[in-house]
């Protein structure tokens, strides 16, 4: 499966790869969850994020960003004391901050999803060469850099261009499944997509 061989690391990764990764997201809460997981992952392993995903959901009210936006210092303390939660006050406050920013995006664009999907004109992007077997996938590109810059300007935290590239892969704005992966075929058959040239890729 080339690039998608990462899914075979363990059952958690396999389930995530087969049922979520790269499937277009058009639900605001799900979109915020994907973004938050990427933000929480900074400096940590992705497998740890999947392992603690239920804990994150419990701490952040199922990632309902409109509720999270109202969290106070007592909520930060509650989350820090939650069993097996990562003990990063900065990241916890970052998620709360991002929830407030997400509310503003929803107010301006109608939904959080509308903000992100505007960048691909509501189609999944397949970059030339990415889906080839054993191809090298970038960690960021021109699009992730532009979105990252805009989100930072709007006050978001932990949204560097590498984090945003991973977010776009996860929520289906970019299809980086190997061409031989069954998920690649499923996504191209069920969702609108566009093929584009590579965009200022960084490896």
Image (tube, rainbow, N blue to C red):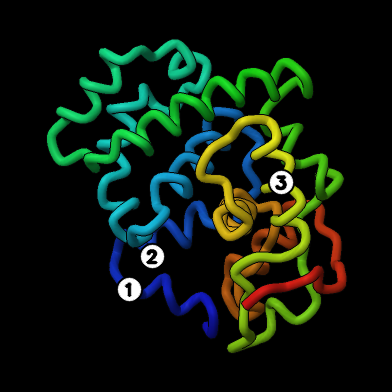
Q: CA distance from mark 2 to mark 3?
A: 32 Å
State which mark lies toward you, 2 or 1.
1
Instruction: Confirm or deny contact between disc 3 and disc 1 (CB under 8 A).
Output: no
State the image coordinates of residue 187 (x, y, percent, origin top left): 67, 59
Which of the numbered marks, if any, corresponds to residue 14?
Answer: 2
Judge the density around disc 3: few (<14), some (14-19), many (≥20) Cα neighbours within 10 Å.
some
Q: Is residue 6 above or below residue 85?
A: below
State the image coordinates of residue 59 (x, y, percent, origin top left): 29, 27
Q: Is residue 111 above or below residue 48?
A: above
Answer with mark 2 or mark 3, whichever residue precedes in sequence: 2
Instruction: Confirm or deny contact between disc 2 and disc 1 (CB under 8 A).
Output: yes
Which of the numbered marks, if any, corresponds to residue 149?
Answer: 3
State the image coordinates of residue 118 (x, y, percent, origin top left): 82, 40
Q: In the rendered image, which quarter is residue 12 located in?
A: bottom left
Judge the density around disc 2: few (<14), some (14-19), many (≥20) Cα neighbours within 10 Å.
some
Residue drawn at x 75%, y 34% is 115
State the image coordinates of residue 95 (x, y, percent, origin top left): 44, 32
State which mark lies toward you, 2 or 3.
3
Residue 166 or residue 195, whichever sits in front: 166
Answer with mark 2 or mark 1, whichever residue precedes in sequence: 1
Residue drawn at x 38%, y 65% is 14
């Amino acid at each position: 499966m080339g690039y998608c061989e990462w899914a075979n690391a363990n059952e958690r990764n396999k389930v995530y790869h087969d049922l979520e990764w790269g499937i277009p997201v058009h639900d605001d809460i799900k979109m915020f969850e994907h973004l938050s997981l990427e933000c929480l992952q900074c400096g940590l392993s992705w497998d740890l994020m999947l392992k603690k995903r239920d804990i994150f959901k419990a701490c952040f009210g199922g990632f309902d960003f409109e509720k999270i936006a109202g969290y106070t210092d007592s909520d930060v303390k509650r989350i820090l004391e939650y069993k097996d939660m990562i003990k990063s006050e900065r990241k916890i406050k970052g998620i709360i901050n991002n929830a407030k920013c997400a509310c503003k995006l929803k107010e301006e664009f109608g939904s959080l999803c509308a903000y992100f999907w505007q960048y691909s004109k509501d189609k999944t992007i397949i970059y030339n060469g990415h889906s080839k077997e054993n191809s090298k996938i970038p960690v960021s590109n021109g699009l992730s850099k532009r979105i990252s810059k805009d989100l930072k300007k709007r006050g978001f935290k932990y949204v560097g261009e590498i984090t945003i590239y991973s977010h776009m892969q996860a929520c289906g704005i970019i299809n980086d499944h190997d061409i031989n992966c069954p998920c690649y075929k499923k996504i191209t058959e069920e969702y609108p997509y566009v093929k584009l040239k590579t965009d200022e890729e960084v490896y």
